Image: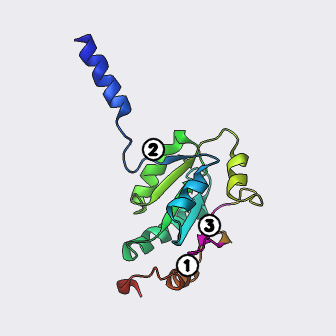
Amino acid sequence: MLCRLCLLLVCLAAWPASAAEPARFDSGSLAKIEARYAGKPFILSLWSVNWCGHCIDELTMLGKLSKNEKNLPLVLVAVDSPEDSDAIRKTLRKLGLSHAESWVFDDPIPERLRASIDPTWQGELPRSYLYDKAHRRQAAVGTLDEARLKAWLEQQGQRSGAAK
């Protein structure tokens, strides 16, 4: 009986996290994200669940936009810590972004991760990077302007017919 219980516990521990579980973002994660989107445009949005009210405004706009733009190429990176994963999941679900690719910083020294994304980034949020198909990127500091974002999506050929 004890062996069965141990086996069950081992199986449960190996069970994959839910789809909404944020992946752990480390110094090599941006390269993985860029490789996965090779030849495709995407939005990298950096935010915090704990201390950035403007981030919630931006995520609210992105959640509404994603309802019309079913293939919105969005990658969300919370600059919080893995201990905040429940709050991150709840916030994204509430804002209609539980389907979006989600990451959370996983380094006790977050400055290292900021530098791996952009050596000039001092930590201000929200911050986004709009990657075109060739992965030339434009930084957007502060809340993304919805009209600018829609125009950028149009340029990238990412706007759906229903949302035009």
- Disc 2/disc 1 C-alpha distance (Å): 28 Å
Closer to the chain start, of discs 2 and 1, is: 2
Left or right: where does residue 52 sit relative to residue 123?
Answer: left
Left or right: where does residue 76 sit relative to residue 128?
Answer: left
- Disc 2/disc 3 C-alpha distance (Å): 23 Å
Residue carrying label 3: 128
Q: Amino acid under label 1?
A: Leu
* Quarter of the N terminus within the rendering: top left
Residue 90 screen position, x and y as percent: 42, 51
Q: Secondary structure at mark 1?
A: helix
- Please rate how many residues cluster around mark 2, counting C-alpha atoms within 10 Å: few if below 14, some from 14 to 19, many from 20: few
- Residue 120 shows which numbered tag? none
- Residue 86 shows which numbered tag? 2
Q: Residue furthest left?
A: 1
- Disc 1/disc 3 C-alpha distance (Å): 11 Å
Q: Amino acid under label 3?
A: Ser
Residue carrying label 1: 149
Magenta stretch, residue numbers: 125-137
